[in-house]
Image (tube, grey):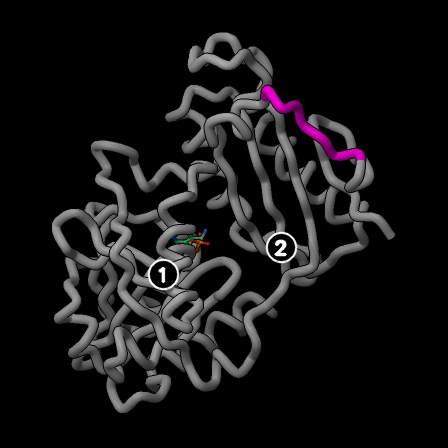
Amino acid sequence: MALKVYIDGELVDEENAKISVFDRCLLYGDGVFEGIRAYNGKIFKEQEHVDRLYDSARVCLIDIPLTKEEFARAMYDTMAANNLEDAYIRAIITRGKGDLGLDYRKCPKPSVIIIAASIELYPEEFYQKGLEVVTASTQQIRSNVMEPRIKSCNYLKNILAKMEAIRAGCIEAVMLNAKGEVAECTGDNIFIVKDGVIKTPPPEAGILLGVTRGVVLELAREAGMDPRETPLTRFDLYCADECFLTGTAAEVIPVINIDGRPIGDGKPGPITLDLLEQFRRLTRA
Ligand code: PMP
């Protein structure tokens, strides 16, 4: 059965889901997006994702033509049209059709696109054995140039960093900021554990404020730990006892090697595995 895609209020077959060649998202990456999961028919952290999407759009002066409630309903309608209970949802808001110039006022109507598909999970092996990652030479952009908290459709720097990972035989890369501090990975946030303390870079390091990151910080607090949002360097990564990544698609995934250096004893650590289990319990409940 052809995938049904939501475009501007209609659910259409995938092959009829089309946008104009004058769409600003195509011409300039002028749009914002979200990647969201649904488990057992329920959208996970719906409010957080919708809020982040609307904040991203607001900063870009893109007026989403739906209320947040209507937007959530549209996501559920798209899932239902595709008979999906467990789904990966990609929501995209483009500034819409304009001319070839940059003037945003010439794009009167933003487009809303929602794709709900089956999630392609990382192989279970990665969760059991852990990932190897590398530091990319492609840096995270400075927030006074482009705010990383905007989840914009400009992902070229992340793609360039991901290329470095793939060419080094990995699937993820760590991106540093202009100060040389650890920021995040190409599509995930990063955490370490050192002497029993969970640490992750703060918002000022230039990161997307990941929804999964927020959930993991909360799970750690509920477990009586005192996780820290603190600047990290490669020194901290290389000397960490444990390392893991968080993201909507990856959930919580252990890292066992960074730049050819084993982390801890080169196996997924106990705190990482415990958080992974707690995260799975929460989402599969
Ligand atoms: N950083 C970047 C650059 C990302 O693209 C993502 C995934 N959307 C994340 C972090 C993780 O965010 P979340 O947990 O909200 O998926």
Name above or below for residue 100 compared with residue 19: above
Quadrant location of residue 134? bottom left
Q: Mark 1 points at which residue?
A: 164
Q: Residue furthest bottom?
A: 265
Where residue 225 sits in the image (x, y, percent)?
26, 72
Where residue 23 sits in the image (x, y, percent)?
58, 23
Q: What stretch is highlighted in magenta?
A: 16-22
Q: Nearer the viewer, residue 28 or 269?
A: 28
Where residue 163 sits in the image (x, y, percent)?
41, 58
Residue 65: in sight, yes or no? Answer: no
Q: What residue type is labelled 1?
A: Glu
Quadrant location of residue 85? bottom right
The local secondary structure at tag 2 comes to strand
Question: For residue 31, which numbered disc appears in the image?
Answer: none
Q: Mark 1 or mark 2: name the one nearer the start of the chain.
A: 2
Give the position of the C terminus as an image quadrant: bottom right
Residue drawn at 48 percent across, 21 percent down: 62
Residue drawn at 48 percent across, 34 percent down: 32
Where residue 176 sits in the image (x, y, percent)?
22, 55
Q: Name the residue under label 2.
A: 88
The local secondary structure at tag 1 comes to helix
Task: Rate crowding at label 2 as few (under 14), some (14 to 19) or many (20 or more) other CA atoms within 10 Å.
Answer: many
Q: What residue type is labelled 2?
A: Tyr
**Residue 20 magenta-highlighted:** yes
